[in-house]
Image (tube, grey):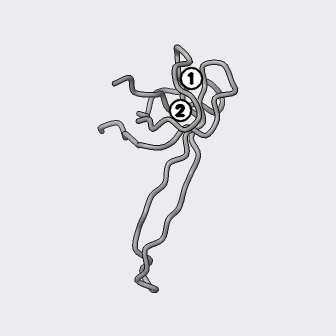
Amino acid sequence: MPKRILEGTVTSAANEQTVTVSVERRFKHPVLKKIIRKSKKYRAHDEQNTFKIGDLVRIIECPPKSKTKRWEVLVA
């Protein structure tokens, strides 16, 4: 099974080696037939602390790094 890759914006970089990434998805509501935006925050591992608030990043699934981190930032 391939690992998921998501794209989002860094909303927090306060913790050491961790960034919080807000990922927004758009979908059509099944009844209202209207485009809806939903966002979810993921905590991702950032080894060198290179990303700052507002950066557009891609994250990939990984084995658990801590209690809350299941993602790591892809270095392009």
Instruction: Read off the residue under disc 2.
Output: 70
Q: Where is 73 relative to 1, above or below? A: above
Answer with mark 2 or mark 1, whichever residue precedes in sequence. 1
Residue type at numbered disc 1:
Lys
- Provide residue 62's location: percent of width, then percent of height: 45, 28
Classify mark 2: helix, strand or loop: loop
At a point 69% along the width and 24% down the height, the residue shown is 15
Marks 2 and 1 in Cβ contact (< 8 Å):
yes
Classify mark 1: helix, strand or loop: loop
Give residue 7's quadrant in the image. Answer: top left
Give residue 27's quadrant in the image. Answer: bottom left
Q: Is residue 16 left or right of residue 24?
A: right
Q: Is residue 34 left or right of residue 13?
A: left
Q: Which mark is residue 65?
A: 1
Quarter occupied by the C terminus: top left
- Provide residue 49's location: percent of width, then percent of height: 56, 18
- Provide residue 28's location: percent of width, then percent of height: 40, 74
Residue type at numbered disc 2:
Arg
- Provide residue 75's location: percent of width, then percent of height: 38, 23
Disc 1 residue crowd, few under 14, some 14–19, many 20+, Cα 10 Å: few
Q: Which mark is residue 9?
A: none
Disc 2 residue crowd, few under 14, some 14–19, many 20+, Cα 10 Å: some
Quarter occupied by the N terminus: top left
At a point 53% along the width and 61% down the height, the residue shown is 38
